Image: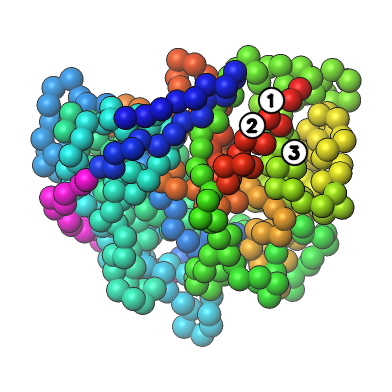
Amino acid sequence: MESVTVLQNFKLVLEPEELIVTTMVEKFTVVPQTPGRRRRLFLSNIDLTLVAFLETVTFFEPPPSPVALAELADTFRGALSRLLVAYDFLAGRLEREREGERLEIDCNGAGVVVVTATCSVDMSQLGELRAPKPAYKELARFLQDVGGEELRDKPLMLFQLTQFKCGGLAIATRSNHCLMDGVAGHEFQINFASFTRGGGLIVVPNSDRSVFKSRDPPEINHPHYEYSKLTDLASTFSLRGLCSPTLKQLPSEELRLVYISPKRIARLKSEALSDHQLKNCTTFHIIAAKIWKARSITLGLPNERISTVLFPVDVRKRVVPPAPDGFIGNALIPGFARATINELKTASASSLVGKVQEGVERLSDEYVKSGIDWLEVHHGVPSQVDSFSVVAWFKLGLDDAEYEWGRVKCLSPLEPYPGLVILLPGEKNEGGINICLKLPPDQMKDFYKLMMED
């Protein structure tokens, strides 16, 4: 089913040749068990840069004893209905303010859509589950184009439960990114897992986003290279909820998973620290710096062009006052590092790691608030000019949750956006990092060579 090429510390995972087929069994809408007070939820400027759907798929091994799909669906439905009492806005719909264009969530209890389906193959036939592949689209097949044409009619969260022939389970999630970031998503997953086991809330959610409101009047005190103005480009994400891709995927682009072993990571860290210019170097710092250099050079840009790498930084506790405990929303601000292509070619490893570290440290309370005010004035989005993003999913603990039907085996993006590099955890018994990215075949080969250089 699957061919794997091993190149020293890297595993190039190719997609299975055979596609899967799913069949819908049932489709239903889950509403909060106890209706709450209808309200409008304010969305911050951070949320409004992310009005687009994100799709992931979570895999579970077959349980020791066979479990019928109908029984799984009943457990899922009951737990979700109880959980939506605390997460009422997930069952809401996007709506505009009565006197303006700003989007907010109408917590109207319209519900979360859930689909159950069966699959024609065993889960093992998919091969390496952490590697996104075309076959995964079938696992979210029945979540597409749900709802009416109007924004207010579209569900903000949808699930597809697909049971494989072997009894294994895949749960595809399609959710609007304006609802929450990865940190909040992990806490939601922990709570959901607890509810399926008959428990209660592990983390009490707080959806109040007022801590991230812009100032009046706005005060922009820093240049914000992490954002682009909408007037300069058609954006992947729109502040007004209109999604129009700009980072177009080239027909020849390939999606690959590149594995970096713990031994290789340790060697890269040692190299970055060897000239004693850095006090420390984390796994993320060195991997982000290495990817920044390799991917930027691979694209063949002129030496004088500036390449920008973006990376989300959690600012929940960096702002004053801090976000409340259990904050559920978006509080990951794009940190960034910038350098010319020539600098990337000639700079030492410690220098590039240092730029990444500066990008993290830059995000003080004042800088974050200046950025929120910049978005208020310019209605911008994360930078898309000679830039790309590196997102560290391996730090979120997304594989940790244990549901009534079993522990998560792994979680994978359904299909990363072009310009997005996702860092996934390695196998639990191996460690290391899996780099998930798209590049044309010739550039992918150059990327490997540059990643292999010390």
- Residue 413 screen position, x and y as percent: 44, 43
User: Which residue matches tag 2?
Assistant: 448
* Residue 447 inside the magenta-drawn segment: no
- Residue 375 screen position, x and y as percent: 68, 66
Q: Are marks 2 and 1 in contact (CB under 8 Å)?
A: yes
- Residue 318 screen position, x and y as percent: 69, 45
CA gap, disc 2 and disc 1: 6 Å
* Residue 30 inside the magenta-drawn segment: yes
Q: Could you tell me which residue is drawn at 63 percent across and 47 percent down?
A: 389
Apparent side of residue 1 relative to residue 188 in the rendered image (left or right): left
Which-is-in-front pick, marks 3 and 2?
2
Which residues are drawn in magenta? 21-40
Location of residue 438 by image quarter: top right
Apparent side of residue 23 relative to residue 239 in the rendered image (left or right): left
Q: Does residue 215 lie above or below 122 as drawn?
A: below
User: Which residue matches tag 1?
Assistant: 452
Q: Amino acid at mark 1?
A: Met
Neighbour tally class for label 2: few under 14, some 14-19, many 20 plus, Cα within 10 Å: some
Location of residue 37 by image quarter: bottom left
Q: Amino acid at mark 3?
A: Lys
Image quadrant where one finds the N terminus? top left
First in sequence: mark 3 vs mark 2: 3
Relative depth, front residue between 37 and 374: 374
Q: Amino acid at mark 2?
A: Tyr
User: Which residue matches tag 3?
Assistant: 293
Q: Could you tell me which residue is drawn at 52 percent across and 69 percent down?
A: 244
Element at badge 3? helix
Element at badge 1? helix
Q: Does residue 353 lie above or below 205 as drawn?
A: above
CA gap, disc 3 and disc 2: 12 Å
